[in-house]
């Protein structure tokens, strides 16, 4: 194992906002990945790389992140992903995208169609974006994630290019 910690913890410098702070790109290094520091399960790109993180094999998919967003705005949350030619375990596998404001907030979730329809071309998921309205007052730390922790089947071959947060106009 490359680290004494089995999980990869997000690096804040891997979150990039555009000049207007209306869109953030969270590179793989900016994501928390369960079992991400164990090369039996994930291959992480070099720091500051634009390469995707590669899922080798897991039965518990949990990839999360968080960013501070502006009060009074609505945001879309999603991931840009692809599958390798030898990807496995995604057929009929329910994957969920979830988001909430603040650590104690209530999750908004979307069950996505199985990922086995994806190909080698990177695509944004989910098709229907998860959206969160940030109130004028209160929490503005947005927590989000991609999950498949329920079916217990092994899956692999997923490439996560980045996550994104976009202000909805």
Image (tube, helix red, strand yellow):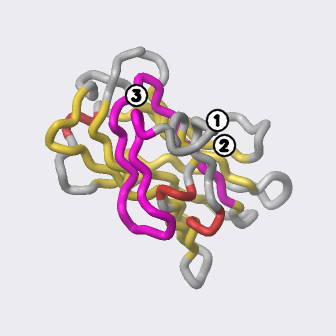
Q: Quadrant of residue 45?
A: bottom left
User: What residue is drawn where x is 56% and y is 72%?
Assistant: 16
User: What residue is drawn where x is 62% and y is 69%?
Assistant: 13
Q: Where residue 91 sits in the image (x, y, percent)?
A: 23, 25
Which one is in front in this view, the residue at disc 3 or the one at disc 1? Answer: 3
Q: Where residue 64 sits in the image (x, y, percent)?
A: 57, 44
Asked whether the residues under the numbered discs 2 and 1 touch, taking CB atoms below 8 Å apart as contact, a structural biologist would say yes
Which one is in front in this view, the residue at disc 2 or the one at disc 3? Answer: 3
User: What residue is drawn where x is 58% and y is 66%?
Assistant: 15
- Answer few, some or many: residues within 10 Å of disc 2's Cα (few below 14, many 20 plus, some between 14 and 19): many
**Highlighted magenta segment, given as a residue range:** 39-67
Relative to 28, residue 112 above or below = above
Q: Where residue 7 sits in the image (x, y, percent)?
A: 58, 39
- Answer few, some or many: residues within 10 Å of disc 3's Cα (few below 14, many 20 plus, some between 14 and 19): many
Query: In the current view of this chain or complex, which residue is farthest to the right?
Result: 137
Q: Earlier in the sequence, mark 3 or mark 1?
A: 3
Q: Earlier in the sequence, mark 2 or mark 3?
A: 3
Q: Earlier in the sequence, mark 2 or mark 1?
A: 2
Which residue is at the front of the view, 117 or 14? 14
Helix, strand, or loop for circle 2? Answer: strand
Q: CA distance from mark 2 to mark 1?
A: 5 Å
Q: CA distance from mark 3 to mark 1?
A: 24 Å
In the image, residue 121 lies in the stretch drawn in magenta: no
Q: Tell me: 66 left or right of 82.
A: right
Tell me the quadrant of the picture where the C terminus can be found.
bottom right
Residue beneath disc 1: 107
Asked whether the residues under the numbered discs 2 and 3 touch, taking CB atoms below 8 Å apart as contact, a structural biologist would say no
Helix, strand, or loop for circle 1? Answer: loop
Residue beneath disc 2: 100
Residue beneath disc 3: 58
């Amino acid at each position: 194992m490359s680290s004494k910690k089995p999980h990869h913890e997000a690096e804040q410098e891997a979150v990039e906002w555009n000049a207007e702070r209306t869109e953030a790109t969270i590179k793989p290094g900016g994501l928390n990945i369960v079992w991400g520091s164990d090369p039996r399960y994930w291959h992480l790109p070099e720091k500051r790389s634009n390469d995707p993180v590669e899922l080798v094999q897991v039965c518990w998919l949990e990839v999360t992140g968080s960013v501070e967003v502006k009060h009074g705005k609505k945001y879309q949350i999603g991931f840009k992903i692809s599958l390798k030619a030898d990807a496995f375990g995604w057929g009929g596998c329910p994957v969920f995208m979830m988001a909430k404001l603040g650590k104690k907030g209530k999750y908004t979730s979307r069950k996505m169609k199985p990922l086995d329809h994806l190909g080698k071309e990177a695509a944004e998921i989910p098709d229907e974006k998860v959206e969160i309205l940030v109130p004028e007052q209160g929490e503005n730390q947005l927590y989000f994630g991609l999950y498949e922790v329920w079916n217990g089947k092994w899956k692999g071959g997923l490439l996560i290019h980045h996550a994104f947060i976009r202000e909805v106009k």
